[in-house]
Image (cartoon, rainbow, N blue to C red):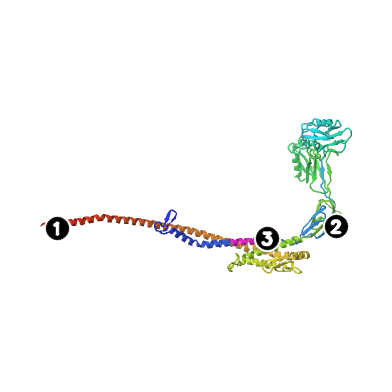
Amino acid sequence: MATSTTGTVLSGLASGIDWTSLINNLVTIERAPETQWNSQIATLNKKNAAYQTLGSDLSKVQTDISNLTDPSFFRSRTVSSSNPDVASATASSGTPVGNYNFKVTQLATSASITGYSMAAQPVSTGDGSDLSLGSQSFAMPISDGNFTVDGQTISVKSTDTLGSVFAQINSKTGGTVSGAYDSSSDTITLTDKNGDPITLGSSADTTNFLQATGLFNNQSSSVTSATRLGTINVYLTAADSGLATPVSNGDGATQGSFTINGVPITYDATSDSINDIMGRVNSSAAGVTMAYDSVNHKFSLTNDNTGDTGITLSNGTGNFLDATGLTGWSDTNTGVTTQGNNMQYTVNGSAPLTSMSNTINGASVGIAGLSLTAQDTGTATISVGSDTSTIASAITSFVNDYNTAQNYISSQTATTKDSNGNTVPGLLTGDFDIEQVSSNLRQMVDAAVPGMSGSIQSITDIGIQSNGQDNTFTLDSTALSQALSNNLEGVQQLFSQSGNGLARSVNSYLLTTMGGNGPLISKEASFTQQTTALQASITQLESKIGMDETSMQNEFVNMEDAIAKSNTAKQYLTAYFSSSSASAAPAASSISSGSSSSSSSSSSSSSTG
């Protein structure tokens, strides 16, 4: 008796029937359609992927061909300069081809105002003898170490005073060299009393004292700091920034103001830093850039644009422009204005021309589409030519991407032979839509363009030939280059002629083919719809199989219960009847014994009588 288990029920325990295996076999038979459906789904997914790949390939072809629909693309230009250090240039589509000789005699410059160098407070208001070297007044912090004067080693520390350094120099040089500080110029002067040249520094120096104080060899007996020693901290409030004349808002005013090129700028000297105010100037409509030179301790204003223009300044409330040295109270204590210049040049020996900018356009020079930027004075020849290499590259890309698309279509539609010589269809063999796309593209690209005359009427005339075996083309790059050089206008008409140029026709066809109502999108949607329907069928069938399997299991379980109950009753009856038969046997023996006794008795009685 075969048995198997299902859930908590032992299959065939009572009946002897392996009904679990029977149910499994029936379920397998009922599920048989799913094998075909899953196979169909796999095929549909492959076809969908194939269409998506083709769509991607055709999209590349459409991108290539769309460039060739624009007539201006065929008028692209190359530009070169015989002297890039003097001038560089660019040329837009359609710029006249030729050589243009430029002579630049003056560059355009920006107007500027540089503040006077008295802007910073001196490091000391006296003779500097008690000024600590560690003072933050110095523009460059002085480090500990040694330096030399006339070969004598001078040791300094940040705790030393300037007076003690002067004393050490004088002592170490035997009283020959003396030092002094002038607060009016904010400089140090070393003097040799004998008139001999002073030698400063050596490779063994370990402090930056000489650099920080601006003392450098000049082969004379007197050396003075090259720049003022004090500095301005543009990040502190304007009133406390270290300017020789502190910035103020003006008597009783809560804000100061000034104008640059007629644009008002406001500030609060007690809360705004000089850096804040400079940022306000630079972001305003004044059209200037304000900066601070921390080496020379000067402020400057520079026009953002070049040309023969000036900068106008006016203090309003407060003294910001005076305090920063951009304006002043005398001819010697005021900013220095440098007027801007216009660019001056000639083209092909023309009369002198001017430009406020160093970049001039076609309208300025009378050469449409040409833009030139002067780098320096001098002469340069700008050569403009047709950019045939870019055009050839675009046509080559089109042919290559077209061939890629056609080869992919062929790989999906072609039939092959298996090892037994049987014909095996491709994934898309017999697909009318995809074969029609391939055929239409071939015919459109290979056809003569209506209305064309002369030496170029089809792609065959520019070196693009059918290979005679499939829908792809071969490209003769030499023939294409010759066509572009000898008849660029004809090539342009072939591709971009209004209405029916090759590129325009192919581009229109591809946009329609790949569009929402085109065969590619429609076919992909159909594949997806079929796949969805098959998956729904599988889901429905699985639901039915589950219910059928449960129903059969219940019926067999009920059968097992019935058989088990029947077997139990059978066993009871068998046992019952067996027990009844055993109890009836002694009674029969007793009857037989009584009969025998009676018979004996009768026999005895008969003898007696």
Residue 356 place in picture, x, y as percent: 82, 50
Q: Indicate the quadrant containing the N terminus: top left, top right, bottom left or bottom right.
A: bottom left
Magenta span? 45-65
Q: Quadrant of residue 371?
A: bottom right
Q: Which residue is mark 3?
A: 60
Sort mark 3 into few (<14), some (14-19) or many (20+) by Cα contacts within 10 Å: some
Residue 332 place in picture, x, y as percent: 85, 39
Asked if residue 301 is positioned above or below residue 363 in the image, the reply reads above
Q: Which residue is mark 1?
A: 603
Instruction: Tell me how far mark 3 sits from mark 2, CA to CA.
Output: 45 Å
Near-viewer residue (487 or 11): 11
Residue farthest to the right, as pictured: 195
Q: Quadrant of residue 297?
A: top right
Name the chief secondary structure element in magenta. Answer: helix
Tag 3 or tag 1, which sits nearer the N-term?
A: 3
Q: Is residue 603 left or right of residue 208?
A: left
- Numbered-mark total: 3
Near-viewer residue (453 or 308): 453
Which mark lies nearer to you, 1 or 3? 1
Residue type of the residue flagged with mark 1: Ser
Asked if disc 3 and disc 2 are in contact, CB closer than 8 Å, the reply is no
Q: Indicate the quadrant containing the C terminus: top left, top right, bottom left or bottom right.
A: bottom left
Residue type of the residue flagged with mark 2: Asn
Near-viewer residue (271 or 219): 219
Near-viewer residue (582 or 229): 582
Q: Is residue 483 visible?
A: yes
Asked if disc 1 and disc 2 are in contact, CB closer than 8 Å, the reply is no
**Circle 3 SS class:** helix
Tag 2 or tag 1, which sits nearer the N-term?
A: 2
Q: Which residue is mark 2?
A: 348
Asked if residue 179 is positioned above or below residue 44 in the image, the reply reads above
Residue 461 place in picture, x, y as percent: 74, 68
